[in-house]
Amino acid sequence: MGIIVEPGDPREPENRALIEAAQTQMRALFPADENHLLSPEALHAPDVRFFVAREYDTTLGCGALAQRQGYGEVKAMYVVPFARGQGVGRRILARLELEARHLDLPCLRLETGDALAEAIGLYEAEGFARRGAFGDYAETGSSVFMEKRLD
């Protein structure tokens, strides 16, 4: 596959639709108070880097890196259903890690849901380990918190 992961604007219609598809999936899987979704406008904030994976002119997925005090947080990871299992998520995650290293962040952290076994498997395969809640998150019945050291 000739997949390219490049910076994108989450407010553009095609990217907004991708974010909305991801959020629709999360709302179907988890209670509202356990969803930590960011709007396209929030994903365009100065402290967030948003990336889109494409093959030719087809958008396959997205992911974002939010700069936090002392770490980078992986946000808005999503791959369209027909492209899953083809390495798209791995490429997006690699691009987020490259950006975090460029910003001299010591680690990446993320929050995901326990119903997302494939995502958890990807994160574990890429060196993330489970940890406790961080930042403004609280322990919930469905949240899985993970971290990968970069230093």
Image: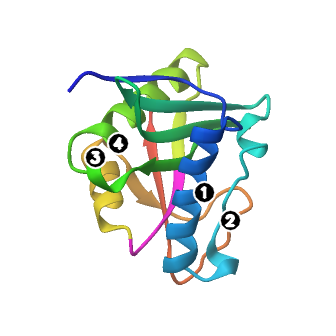
Observer-nearest of 148 and 98: 98
Magenta-colored segment: predominant secondary structure: strand
Which residue carries the number 3 mark?
83
Question: On residue 89, which mark appears?
Answer: 4
Q: Is residue 74 above or below residue 151?
A: below
Query: In terms of secondary structure, where does tag 1 sit?
Result: helix
Label 1 CA crowd tier, 10 Å (few <14, some 14–19, many 20+): some
Label 4 CA crowd tier, 10 Å (few <14, some 14–19, many 20+): many
Q: Check disc 2 and give the amino acid type.
A: Tyr
Q: Check disc 4 and give the amino acid type.
A: Gly
What span is colored magenta in the figure? 110-115
Observer-nearest of 73 and 5: 5
Q: Check disc 1 and give the amino acid type.
A: Glu
Looking at the rendered image, the disc whose residue lies closer to the viewer, 4 or 2, is: 4
Rendered location of residue 74, percent (x, y): 54, 44
Q: Is residue 139 above or below residue 88?
A: below
Magenta run includes residue 65? no
Which residue carries the number 1 mark?
20
Real-space Cα separation, disc 3 to disc 2, in angstroms: 30 Å
Magenta run includes residue 114? yes
Residue drawn at (40%, 26%) of the image? 57
Which residue carries the number 2 mark?
137
Q: Quadrant of residue 37?
A: bottom right
Real-space Cα separation, disc 1 to disc 3, in angstroms: 17 Å
Q: Residue furthest top?
A: 102
Q: Is residue 151 visible?
A: no
Q: Point out the tag, 4 or 2, that comes first from the N-terminus.
A: 4
Q: Is residue 31 visible?
A: yes
Query: In terms of secondary structure, where does tag 3 sit?
Result: helix
Q: How is the image coloured?
A: rainbow
